[in-house]
Image (cartoon, rainbow, N blue to C red):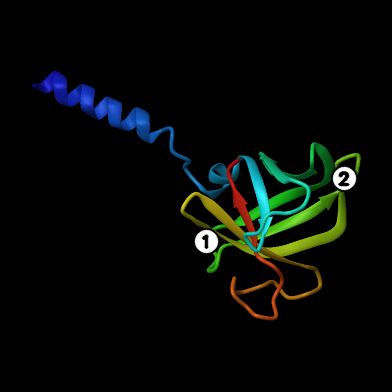
Amino acid sequence: MVLGLAAGAAGYFALRSLEPRDDAERLQGVWRLAPNGRETRLPVTVRITGDRWVYLVGEQEQKRYRLTLRPEANPKELDLMLLGPDDQSSAFVLRGIYAFSDGTARVVVAPDPSPRPTAFDAPDGPPVWVLERP
């Protein structure tokens, strides 16, 4: 019986370790981008690896950003700093908020110096980006 409990506990912790530990891990990977939850004419993909957020239209890389998350904020905040071809940061920053629900991530951003969005449903606010796993 003790061996059964030990095996069960080991299995639980092995499976538990596969779950993302934080928001940065939850965002890693490839996402399909649907502005306001609608499909776009060309497929837009977001690839997040480490602190890099890369936009691809079709298969062509368009823009790269350095991603900074602040999950302790309410609502959760993110910044996307545009990177040049040599991975050097530029002065252009998108400041926004994000949330996870039902296997998707929702993101709303505004370019600096505009104020950071504070809600996902503001009628006169920037569009909501819905990120879905392909």
- In this picture, is 132 found above or below 15? below
Disc 1: which residue? 72
Quadrant of the snapshot with the C terminus: top right
State whether residue 73 is above or below residue 66: below
The answer to whether residue 69 is seen in the rendering is: yes
Circle 1 residues within 10 Å: few <14, some 14–19, many ≥20: few
User: Can you tell which quarter of the image residue 69 is in?
Assistant: bottom right
Q: Residue at x 91, y 41 (%)?
A: 85
- Quarter that holds the N terminus: top left
Residue at image coords 74%, 45%: 43
Q: Where does residue 71 sit, x and y in percent of width and height?
A: 54, 58
Residue at the left extreme of this rendering: 1
The location of residue 106, given as percent across then percent down, is: 59, 59
Taking the spot 64% from the left edge, 44% from the top edge, the residue there is 31
Q: Position of residue 25 (x, y in %)?
A: 55, 42
Earlier along the polypeptide chain: callout 1 or callout 2? 1
Q: CA distance from mark 1 to mark 2?
A: 27 Å
Q: Amino acid at mark 1?
A: Glu
* Mark identifier at residue 88: 2
- Residue 73 in which image quadrant: bottom right
Whether residue 52 is visible: no
Question: Is residue 120 left or right of 11 when viewed as pictured?
Answer: right
Residue reaching furthest to the bottom: 124
Q: Is residue 29 left or right of residue 88?
A: left
| SS category of the residue bearing label 1 | loop
* 28 versus 130 height, above or below: above
Q: Of helix, strand and loop, which one carries label 2? A: loop
Disc 2 marks a residue whose amino acid type is Gln
